[in-house]
């Protein structure tokens, strides 16, 4: 009895103690992703599928999320960058030698059972076969990355089908970011990325780094394969939904004397379709003629070289030294969020193969001190690291690091070195800040207003005040509902209130004593029962936790709730 009452006792204890959060879920756990029971909500390929199926090439469909909401002055440049993603130059004028086709090499490494006869696979095959344009698009996108990924699967003796997994995860969009906080080709969420050494900083996000993320993804898949005794379908299911989810489903079937193969398990809806998608794609690539598809030509040769830069480097300068457009540098190095590589490393850059040697030679002629532009700034009265960092689009931490400051204390007359871009911001059209500008500039339904995040703000507070959804607010600002809201951050909101005012928000919040709490599901719980107990909406609980309302809750499952404590039990 005591165990069953523990979640509510913890909840009341947090309220009595004035704690603003009783969040006991994944944020505070060091659980291995191999044992996780959390489904990874990847971006997937639905956006590209919709574009191909409808024939719409509008920014709202075709360019989401890379070129969403293009500002008029950047529209041409951004569209050109997307064209380069979808139509990379695969043939070189000076290359006339006969080489093994990439598809022959890929097929030679296939190891999954392509003969499986399952309706879920047949449904996916039917769609792919009737939309050859989709296959062309993902091949064009993936042609930058596929040779490298196949190399890595071969090194680990893994099925070559795993090299096609980024199609299912992100449609080979290196800038993909899901509402479940998954990023990059392989769609790592922050916690899983951190477990595999994929770090994030103001400068850099390893989850988008082709080299680091591919290594992490294949290491993860290799470990999952070993965990499930060499069953690749179970390993793939666990990559999407966590090893714990798959193990629980197998244990459930074992107790019921049912088969424990992937096709017999009761798994989350997304996972049930995840493996069939990959097998259907592999069948297409294995024998395209059987499905009336002609694969675009792709030679078995590296698209890029990895070049050691020896230190931080301005990306615009890198593009000039390599003799390529800066968009190409970003598409090969999407992990670099700003206008330069990270001062802390990795000190490498992916450069098109034919440009690598000229780039190395040109880089060697540039002194290390001139590879990034700097501004010499004298501290004035009223300055702080916060105000200076905002003025120069950087962070206090960066200023402390580059100026060897032990604290955030500065004095009038002190000189600070501030890293700055060598070109105007328009030159870095694929940087995170410019992509966010385009997303926030897009016209939506409602009254547009700009909002500065304050201490204690949550997406739920802001969404409720303006009668919009939590996911909407997050998506409008290039975020996920689980991302932290930092005071001072600028948001765009398309309010549905008749006369949106931010002043009224204070009074609303003063009356509503909302707290973020954690709740662990008990036997017999349902979304409706929990919603009724805490006076919240079922749809809100599902949104806060990325839940499918058609699925049953599992005892022990952790949920996040935003509760008005005046109405709580």
Image (spheres, rainbow, N blue to C red):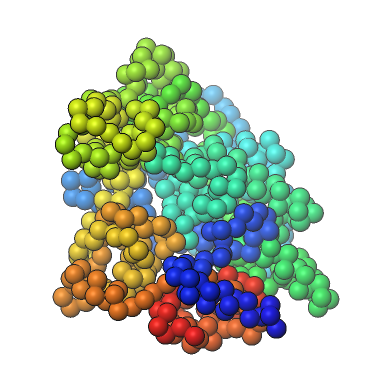
Q: Position of residue 469 (x, y in %)?
A: 35, 72
Q: Which of 204 and 271 is in front in this view?
A: 204
**Which residue of the protein is positioned furthest toward the right in this rendering?**
257
**Location of residue 231 with respect to 368 vertically, above or below:** below
Which quarter of the figure has residue 355? top left
Q: Where is residue 75 in the image (x, y as percent from the top left)?
A: 23, 47
**Location of residue 444 with respect to 203 vertically, above or below:** below
The residue shown at (44%, 70%) is: 18
Image quadrant occupied by the N terminus? bottom right
Q: Where is residue 263 in the image (x, y as percent from the top left)?
A: 71, 68
Q: Which of 46 and 13 is in front in this view?
A: 13
Q: In this view, does 522 lie to the left or right of 450?
A: right
The residue shown at (33%, 78%) is: 512
Q: Which of 401 and 113 is in front in this view?
A: 401
**Which residue of the protein is positioned furthest toward the top in this rendering?**
365
How many numbered discs? Answer: 0
Residue 559 is at least partly visible in this image = yes
The residue shown at (81%, 72%) is: 254
Q: Position of residue 213 (x, y in %)?
A: 55, 42
**Which residue of the protein is positioned furthest toward the front in this rendering?**
17
**Location of residue 522 with respect to 105 vertically, above or below:** below
Residue 426 is at least partly visible in this image = no
């Amino acid at each position: 009895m005591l165990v069953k009452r523990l979640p509510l006792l913890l909840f009341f204890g947090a309220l009595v103690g004035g704690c603003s959060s009783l969040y006991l879920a994944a944020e505070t756990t060091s659980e291995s992703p191999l044992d996780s029971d959390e489904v990874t909500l990847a971006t997937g390929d639905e956006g590209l599928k919709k574009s191909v199926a409808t024939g719409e090439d509008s920014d709202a469909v075709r360019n989401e999320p890379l070129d969403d909401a293009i500002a008029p002055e950047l529209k041409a440049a951004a569209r050109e960058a997307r064209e380069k993603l979808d139509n990379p130059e695969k043939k070189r004028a000076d290359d006339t030698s006969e080489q093994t086709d990439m598809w022959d090499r890929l097929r030679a490494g296939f190891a999954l059972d392509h003969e499986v006869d399952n309706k879920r696979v047949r449904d996916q095959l039917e769609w792919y076969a009737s939309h050859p344009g989709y296959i062309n698009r993902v091949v064009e996108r993936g042609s930058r990355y596929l040779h490298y990924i196949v190399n890595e699967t071969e090194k680990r003796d893994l099925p070559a089908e795993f090299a096609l997994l980024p199609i299912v995860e992100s449609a080979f969009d290196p800038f993909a970011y899901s509402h479940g906080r998954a990023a990059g080709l392989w769609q790592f969420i922050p916690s899983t990325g951190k477990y595999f050494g994929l770090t994030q900083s103001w400068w850099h996000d390893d989850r988008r780094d082709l080299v680091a993320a591919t290594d992490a993804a294949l290491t993860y898949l290799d470990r999952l394969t070993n965990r499930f005794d060499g069953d690749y379908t179970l390993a793939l299911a666990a990559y999407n939904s966590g090893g714990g989810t798959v193990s629980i489903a197998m244990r459930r079937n074992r107790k019921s004397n049912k088969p424990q193969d992937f096709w017999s398990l009761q798994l989350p809806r997304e996972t049930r379709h995840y493996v069939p998608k990959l097998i259907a794609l592999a069948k297409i690539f294995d024998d395209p003629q059987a499905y009336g598809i002609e694969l675009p030509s792709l030679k078995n040769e590296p698209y890029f070289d990895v070049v050691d830069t020896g230190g931080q480097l301005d990306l615009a300068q890198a593009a000039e030294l390599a003799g390529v457009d800066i968009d190409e540098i970003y598409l090969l190095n999407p992990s670099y969020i700003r206008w330069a590589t990270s001062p802390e490393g990795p000190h490498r850059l992916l450069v098109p193969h034919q440009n690598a040697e000229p780039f190395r030679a040109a880089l060697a002629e540039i002194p290390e001190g001139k590879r990034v532009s700097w501004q010499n700034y004298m501290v004035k009265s009223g300055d702080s690291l916060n105000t200076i960092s905002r003025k120069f689009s950087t962070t206090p931490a960066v200023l402390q690091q580059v100026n060897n400051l032990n604290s955030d204390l500065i004095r009038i007359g002190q000189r600070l070195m501030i890293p700055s871009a060598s070109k105007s911001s328009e030159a870095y059209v694929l940087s995170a800040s410019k992509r966010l500008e385009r997303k926030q500039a897009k016209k939506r339904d409602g009254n547009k207003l700009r909002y500065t995040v304050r201490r204690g703000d949550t997406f739920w507070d802001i969404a409720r005040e303006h009668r919009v959804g939590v996911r909407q607010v997050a998506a409008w600002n290039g975020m996920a509902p689980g991302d932290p809201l930092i005071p001072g951050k600028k948001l765009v909101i398309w309010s549905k209130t008749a006369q949106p005012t931010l002043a009224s928000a204070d009074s609303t919040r003063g009356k509503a004593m909302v707290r973020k709490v954690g709740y662990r599901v008990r036997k017999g719980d349902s979304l409706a029962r929990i919603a009724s107990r805490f006076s919240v909406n079922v749809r809100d609980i599902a949104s806060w936790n990325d839940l499918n309302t058609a699925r049953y809750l599992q005892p022990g499952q952790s949920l996040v709730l935003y509760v008005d404590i005046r109405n709580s039990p």
